[in-house]
Image (cartoon, helix red, strand yellow):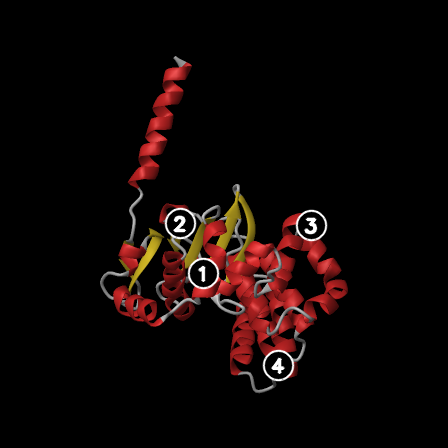
Amino acid sequence: MKTKLFLLLLCLSLSAVQAQPINKEIISEDNVPKLLGKINQEGLSANSYGKWFQKNYTAYTPDPAIIDLIKTDLKNYTIELFMGTWCGDSKREVPKFYKVLEAAEFPMERLTAIAVDRNKGTYKQSPGGEQLGKNIHRVPTFIFYLNGKEVNRITERPVKSLEADILAIQKGNYTPGYHGVTMVNEFLTEHGAEKLIKRSKKIVPELKLLVKNRYELNTYATVLFYAGKKEEAISVYTLNTLLFPEEPGTYLSLANTLGIMERYSESIRYYEKTLGVDPENEEAATSMAYIKSKISH
């Protein structure tokens, strides 16, 4: 009886997976269509997406010498592509990527493409949750797997070119962009938010060599926050203030997030820090005044 019940549940589960729509289109709040969830080249070539996809696909010519070097080994990989049909970087790089795969005769059944959202509540998320546990903070992200294990990824844009970066991945000597974010994510995963805050001052010197600007960790923290990892987000926003102490935006992002979490005294403290760096910052002054009035009532 238990075996029959298990088989029935398994069949229902498989049916549900198979029933998930491909190339699901929704209309966003600004009345712009976007794809969400699992997609394929057919979906990207249709409707309004086809205009930028075909243009950039046609315009790109992969280096044939590099293609010859990558094509044999590339067939051993599986690839996950995370992108946004609303994202300028995705519109630029994803058509090129399909062109590279085609030139390399890559078996397309080994590619899974997923479109993520840009709305606040579902920021960089897919309805199917495919992004979970994969540190998708920038799109496009191309993740390369061998034997089910991630070996490397191309994040947002290639270091040299897509085909050259793939060759470097195959040779095992590739460092993708946003490596500082990867380092922080690995630390958070292993040690947690509390220890990140405690260790922040010690890891700042190393991170300064890797993180180019405040937006790198700021975006990552925002992804964490809307994924429900609020304490982790606060720890990253806090780390960012140490990395870029002269940037008012680092304090402002932290203050706003603390305000949303109703941690008002902490929020006010970071609004004050914002104004200490930028006395004319209207957003900080207005938000702080609002919170103070909220507390007083």
Of the pair 104 and 80, the residue shown nearer to us:
104
Nearer the observer: mark 2 or 3; the answer is 2
Contact, mark 2 vs mark 1 (Cβ under 8 Å): no
Q: Residues within 10 Å of mark 4 (few under 14, many from 20)?
A: some
Counting residues from the start of the chain, the first of labels 4 and 1 encountered is 1
Nearer the observer: mark 2 or 1; the answer is 1
Counting residues from the start of the chain, the first of labels 2 and 1 encountered is 1
Three-letter amino acid code at disc 1?
Answer: Ile
- Residue at mark 2: 112
Residue, far right: 202
Counting residues from the start of the chain, the first of labels 2 and 3 encountered is 2
Three-letter amino acid code at disc 2?
Answer: Thr
Q: Separation of disc 2 and disc 1 at Cα?
A: 21 Å
Q: Separation of disc 4 and disc 1 at Cα?
A: 53 Å
> At 37% across and 62% down in the image, what residue appears?
99
Nearer the observer: mark 4 or 1; the answer is 1
Of the pair 79 and 10, the residue shown nearer to us:
79
> Tag on residue 275?
4
> Tag on residue 67?
1
